[in-house]
Image (cartoon, rainbow, N blue to C red):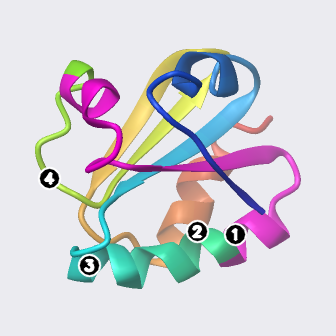
Amino acid sequence: MIDEITDATFEEETSEGVVLTDFWAVWCGPCKMQTPVVEQLSEEMDDVKFTSMDVDKNQETAKNLGIMAIPTLLIKKDGKIVDRLTGFTPKEKLASILEQYTD
């Protein structure tokens, strides 16, 4: 399951454990390819929290984090940014990256 988060809830929702946030927009073609990958992993990886944020509706967080291109996948561990992936990321690669942080 992917939790839809907002500018107001971003810090609280991503402050504990390993959290992946998918920054996307409705009009973004590569985002439409990335979303199913994130959805599949959200069902397979219980030790990671999956969230998504529509950058058109939540511009403040994207601006504060310097997100200039989408899709961008931001990985936080215990509230600290540990990785950032821009552009489409295949499922196997994304799973491998997330596993580094779930020990």
- Residue 89 sits in quarter: bottom left
- Residue 4 falls left or right of residue 3: left
Residue at numbered disc 2? 38
Query: The magenta stretch spans which residues?
Result: 40-63
Label disc, if present, on residue 69 of the rendered structure: 4
Q: Position of residue 88 (x, y in %)?
A: 31, 72
Quarter of the image with the C terminus in it: top right
| Residue appearing at x 59%, y 60% in the figure | 96
Label disc, if present, on residue 30 of the rendered structure: 3
Q: Nearer the viewer, residue 14 or 77?
A: 14
Q: Is residue 97 above or below residue 16?
A: below
Is residue 27 highlighted in magenta? no
Q: Residue furthest left?
A: 68
Q: Amino acid at mark 1?
A: Leu
Query: Counting residues from the N terminus, which is met first, the one under dot 4 or under dot 2?
Result: 2
Q: Secondary structure at mark 2?
A: helix
| Residue appearing at x 76%, y 26% in the figure | 17
Q: Amino acid at mark 3?
A: Pro
- Residue 58 falls left or right of residue 103: left
| Residue appearing at x 69%, y 69% in the figure | 41
Q: Are marks 4 and 2 in contact (CB under 8 Å)?
A: no
Is residue 42 highlighted in magenta? yes
Structural distance between the alpha carbons of marks 3 and 4 = 11 Å
